[in-house]
C-alpha cells in the first residue's frame, strides 16, 4: 500500500511539474493585447527551448524531447536535417508551422478561444506549438 501511494504521489508531482512548466496564453501574450502574434511566439522560443535543453548543449536530443512529452514521430518531423538533434532554428520553424494550425480564422494572430481549442487535458510543457 505504501508503495502504491508513493507511486501515485510521484506521478502526481511529475504531471504537476509538467503543467507548471507549460507556457500559458497570458504568459506568452507579452504586450497584453489579448492575442498572440508570430513575434511573441518567436520571442518565447529560446526560453522554452533552453528550459528543455537539460544538458545545455544547444540542442534537444531524443531523450530530452521525449522527457518533455514529445513523441518519437514528432521528433523525426521536427529534426529537419536528420542529425538526431533539434536545434533552435528547427524548434522555431516547428513553432511557425504550429502557429498556422492554431490560427483558425487566418487573421495572423491567435486569440484565447483559438488557443483553448487546441489545448488538451494531457498537455505537456512543449505543447505550445512545438510538438
Image (cartoon, rainbow, N blue to C red):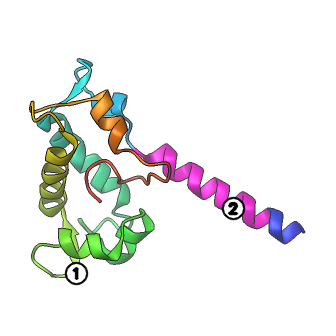
Q: Which residue is mark 2?
A: 10
Furthest toward the top, the residue is: 33
Q: Above or below — where is 35 with respect to 60?
A: above
The picture places residue 91, in percent across and down from the top left corner, at 19, 59
Residue 98 placement, left or right of 64: left
For residue 34: magenta? no
Image quadrant for the C terminus?
Answer: bottom left
For this rendering, which residue is in front, 78 or 106?
106
Q: Which residue is mark 1?
A: 84
SS class of the residue under badge 1? loop
- Within 10 angstroms of label 2, few (less than 14), some, or many (20 or more) residues? few
Residue in view at x 49 percent, y 53 percent: 122
Furthest toward the right, the residue is: 1
Disc 1 and disc 2: Cα gap in Å?
Answer: 30 Å
The picture places residue 20, in percent across and down from the top left corner, at 50, 44
Residue 47 placement, left or right of 82: right
Residue bounds of the magenta highlight: 6-22
Q: Above or below — where is 40 with respect to 131?
A: above
Furthest toward the front, the residue is: 105
For this rendering, which residue is in front, 66 or 85?
66
Tag 1 and tag 2, C-beta contact below 8 Å? no
- The label number, if any, that marks residue 126 in the structure image: none
- Within 10 angstroms of label 1, few (less than 14), some, or many (20 or more) residues? some
Image quadrant for the N terminus?
Answer: bottom right
Task: Determine the main secondary structure of the stretch shown in magenta.
Answer: helix
Quadrant in the rendering for residue 105: top left
Return the disc, 1 or 2, that comes first in the chain's sequence.
Answer: 2
For residue 9: magenta? yes
Amino acid at each position: 500500500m505504501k508503495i502504491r501511494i508513493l507511486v501515485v504521489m510521484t506521478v502526481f508531482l511529475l504531471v504537476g511539474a509538467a503543467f507548471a512548466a507549460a507556457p500559458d496564453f497570458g504568459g506568452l501574450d507579452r504586450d497584453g493585447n489579448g492575442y498572440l502574434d508570430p513575434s511573441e511566439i518567436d520571442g518565447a522560443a529560446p526560453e522554452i527551448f533552453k528550459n528543455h535543453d537539460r544538458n545545455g548543449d544547444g540542442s534537444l536530443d531524443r531523450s530530452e524531447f521525449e522527457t518533455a512529452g514529445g513523441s518519437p514521430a514528432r521528433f523525426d518531423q521536427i529534426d529537419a536535417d536528420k542529425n538526431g538533434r533539434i536545434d533552435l532554428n528547427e524548434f522555431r520553424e516547428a513553432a511557425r508551422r504550429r502557429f498556422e494550425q492554431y490560427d483558425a480564422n487566418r487573421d495572423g494572430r491567435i486569440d484565447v478561444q483559438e488557443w483553448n481549442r487546441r489545448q488538451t487535458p494531457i498537455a505537456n510543457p512543449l505543447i505550445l506549438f512545438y510538438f
